[in-house]
Image (tube, grey):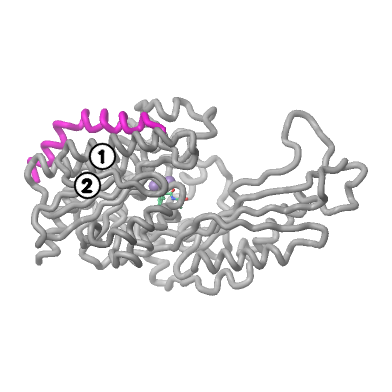
Amino acid sequence: MESTQAYIQSNKERFLKELIDLLRIPSVSADPAFAGDVRKTAELLAAGLENVGADNVEICETAGYPIVYGDKIIDPSLPTVLVYGHYDVQPADPIELWISPPFDPVIKKTDIHPEGAIFARGACDDKGQMFMHVKAFEAMIKSGSLPCNVKFMIEGEEEVGSENLGLFVKNNHDRLDADIILVSDTGIFANDVPSITTGLRGLSYVEVEVTGPNRDLHSGLYGGCVANPINILSKMIASLHDENNKITIPGFYDKVIELSDEERSEMAKAPFKKEGYLKALDIEDVYGETGYSTMERGSIRPTLDVNGIWGGYTGEGAKTVIASQAFAKISMRLVPDQDPKEITQLFYDHFISIAPLGTRVKVTPHHGGEAAVTPIDSIGYKAASMAYEKTFGKKPIPVRSGGSIPIVAMFEKELGLKTILMGFGLDSDAIHSPNEHYGLFNFYKGIETIPYFFSYYSKLVKS
Ligand code: BES
Ligand code: MN
Ligand code: MN
C-alpha cells in the first residue's frame, strides 16, 4: 500500500490536469445543444480507462448517451467491485452568476477549502468524484496492488433520470456481475468530520399546468370576474402544506417509515452547527416540518418543493393582464417506503381535486426514483469505514443524505447488489448551482482512500 500511496503523491499534479481536461468539455445531458460534447466526454473517459490498463473498454451505445464500460479481472475467484459514476453534468445556467466560466476550470482558495478548490460545472458532481476512481485504479495497477477485480460503469444520463442505464443493467446482468457497487457521488459531513452516506431520498417530479380563460385578458375588464390561473396555482400550491409544514396530500405519509427514538438520537450526534448553516446561507432561521431537526428534515422526512413557477407577464415595466395559463415544476423527495409511482398518483388525484371550477389542470409526471438505505453492519460498510479512518485519522459517522441517486435502489432490485456510497464532496460545494467546486483536499483524499477500501474489502471478504 505504501507504493500505491507513493504513486499517488508523485502523480498528483498530472491527475489534477487530467481532471481539468475532463471538466473543460461541457457534457450537459439535459440540453441537446451539447450532444457532441457529451459524446466527446465519453470518448475521453474511455481512452483514459484504456490508458491506465483497463480491459474490455467499450463505449456502450444506448438510445441516449453511451455508458462507458471497462474492467480488470485479475482472478475470477476474487471479489469484484463495480464502480458506478456519471460523466454528465447539470446545465450551467444561470451563467451570469458564475465568477469564472463554468467550463474553464480555475483553482481558487475559499474559507472552507484553504488549500484550494477547483471551480467548474461537474467538479464535484460527478466528474471530480468519478475520476478519483479512475486514478485510484491507475495507482493500484501501476503499483501492482490491485487486490480484487474491478468493473467500471460510468453513465452519461444521471442528471436526466438514468432511463437508458436501467435498460443497460437489465440486459447486462452477466457483464455487471459483482459483489458490491461502489459510488462516489455523495458527500462527507465536513473535511474534519468524515462520514459515509447510508441513505438517499427517492424522488417524484411533476409539472403542473393551470388553464383558465381561453386567452390572456385585460386585468381591469376581467379582473375579479374569472379565475386567474396564477392566483389559483399559487393558492393550490400554498395549500399543499399545513401550518406545521406537513404535506396535505391525502395518503402522502402512509408508507413513511418513522425512525425509532434510538435511531434519531444516534443521528443527532452528528456535529451539526446551526449558526454556521444560517450564516452560510445568509438566512435568519431555518424553516420546515414541526417536530423534526434540520438534519432530519433534510434526510429522513419527505418534502414537497416548487422548483420553478412561471406564467403571465415578466418583462420590463407593468402590463395589466390576466394570463390564460400558469405553470410550475414540483419535486417531492421521498423516504423509505414511499413508492414514487404511488406518490405521483396521489399528487395527481389531489391536485386535480382542489382545482376550482373555471380552471382546468394538467399534471405531467417526470422521472422519479426510490429511496435507498444501506446497512452499517455489512462488510462493504466496514471496509469503507476502515478506509476513511485510515486516511482521515477519524472513524466516519453514518449520515443519511437528502439527495437522490435513483439507480441505487434499481441496482439492488435488478442485480441484487448493495451500494457503498463513498462520497467526498461537501454540501457547500454548490453542486447544481453557479460556482460549483470541489476541494483539492477532497479530490486527493478520495484517491488515497479508495485503494484502502479495495484492500480492506478484499481482506474482509476472504476472512
Ligand atoms: N450526486 C447527486 C445526488 C446527491 C448529491 C446525493 C449529494 C447525495 C448527496 C446526483 O447527481 C443528483 O443530482 N441527483 C438528482 C436526481 C436525479 C434523478 C436528477 C437529485 O438529487 O436531484
Ligand atoms: Mn451526481
Ligand atoms: Mn447531480
Disc nearer the start of the sequence (2/1): 1
Q: In the displayed structure, does residue 448 sit left or right of residue 204?
A: left
Along the line of sight, which residue is nearer the eye, 40 or 449? 40
Q: Is residue 358 magenta?
A: no
Q: Helix or strand or loop: what does disc 2 sit on?
A: strand
Badge 1, how many Cα within 10 Å: few under 14, some, many 20+? Answer: many
Where residue 25 appears, x then y in whole percent? 37, 31
Q: Looking at the picture, how far across and down is residue 11, in whole percent?
A: 16, 31
Q: What stretch is highlighted in magenta?
A: 1-26
- Whether 4 is drawn above or below 106: the answer is below
Name which residue lies at 29% across and 33% down: 19
Looking at the figure, which quarter contains the C terminus? bottom left
Distance between mark 2 and mark 1 Cα atoms: 8 Å
Q: Characterize the magenta stretch by its predominant secondary structure.
A: helix
Query: Which residue in the structure is indicated by mark 1?
Result: 46
Q: Name the amino acid, label 2.
A: Gly
Q: Are marks 2 and 1 in contact (CB under 8 Å)?
A: yes
Residue where numbered disc 2 is placed? 70
Where on the picture, by quarter, is residue 462?
A: bottom left
Q: In the image shown, does 422 or 73 lie closer to the viewer?
A: 73
Label placed on residue 365: none
Considering depth in this image, is 447 or 144 the residue closer to the camera? 144
Residue 374 can be seen in this image: yes
Query: Is residue 192 something one can see in this rendering?
Result: no
Amino acid at dot 1: Ala
Residue 250 located left or right of residue 26 = right
Instruction: Give the residue displayed 37% in from the left and 57% down from the top.
Output: 167
Residue 73 in the image: above or below residue 141: below
Neighbour class for label 2 at 10 Å: few (<14), some, many (≥20)? Answer: many
